[in-house]
Every structure is written in structure tokens, then in C-alpha cells.
Amino acid sequence: RHYWFSFVLTLASLYSTFTQIAQGHLAGACQALRDSAAAGVQTQEFMDLLTAERRIEPAPAFLVQVYAMPFMGFHRLDQILATFVSIALSVKSLVAYLAESIDLPLGEVCEELRERDRGNGN
């Protein structure tokens, strides 16, 4: 009856995992984590691993959480709060990824155009 619910979750998880395997991120995940911890900042390899995961999983997670809300049978305030916090974090993750992948590159393009215009005397 609600098979698409589990299908979406499974598909998103498998796609994310196979993408990470194909790009070699999972093979070096432990080393990337160690390098990041030793450096005290996220290394490029570690950020690539996180980006591969953040590219796929936030949207299906958000949709599944919203879809499942009517079936959860809330009985206590803490259950309701935990659900809304989880949904808010999914939205935050999705918005952060979109801002990083769309907004920041657009800012760089605008800056390049301004630099070009300054060079042309405009």
C-alpha cells in the first residue's frame, strides 16, 4: 500500500552509496576522517564525501518525514518536538546544500563579471 515510501528511501540510500563507491569516497572515508581530525579542519576529501551524501539524501528524507507524520501516532510532547526538529534539520540541510551549490557559485560568477567590467573601464 505504501510501498513507494520504502522505495524512495531505499533508492536514495542505494544511489548515494553507489555514487560514493563509484567516486572512491568510501574507500578513503576513514583516512579522510583521520586527516581532517589531524588537521583540525575538513579536508577536501572529507568535504567531497559529505557533498556526495548531501546531494541526494536531504530531499527524500524531508519528503518521507512529512509523509509519515499522519501515521506516527503522537502520544507525547517530546515525540512531536523530536519530529519537528528532525524535519527542520532536513530542511536546513537541503537549504544549506542548495545555497552552497547554487548561490555561492553564482556569487563567484558575479564577482568575475564585475572584475571583467572594471578591466574594460565600465
Image: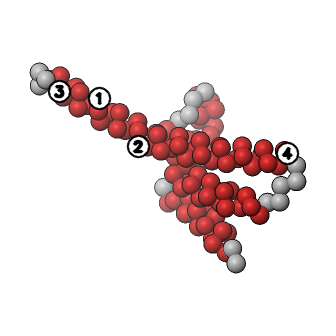
Crowd rating for badge 1 (residues with CA inside 10 Å; few <14, some 14–19, many 20+)? few
Q: Quadrant of residue 67?
A: bottom right
Amino acid type at image mark 3:
Asp
- Label 2: few (<14), some (14–19) or many (≥20) C-alpha neighbours in 10 Å: few
Reading the image, the residue beneath label 1 is: 111
Work out whether residue 83 or residue 121 is closer to the camera in this orientation and state it: 83
The residues bearing labels 2 and 1 have C-alpha atoms spaced at a distance of 15 Å
CA separation in Å, label 1 and label 3: 10 Å
Residue 101 placement: quadrant: top left
Residue with the mark numbered 2: 102
Q: Secondary structure at mark 1?
A: helix
State the colouring used for the structure image: secondary structure
Instruction: Please state if 91 lies on the left or on the right of 118 as rendered.
Output: right
Q: In this figure, which residue is indicated by the disc labeled 3?
A: 117
Identify whether 12 is placed above or below 32: below
Q: Earlier in the sequence, mark 2 or mark 4?
A: 4
Distance of mark 3 from mark 2, alpha carbons? 23 Å
Q: Amino acid at mark 1?
A: Glu
Tell me whether circle 1 and circle 4 mark residues in contact (CB < 8 Å): no
Amino acid bearing label 2: Ile
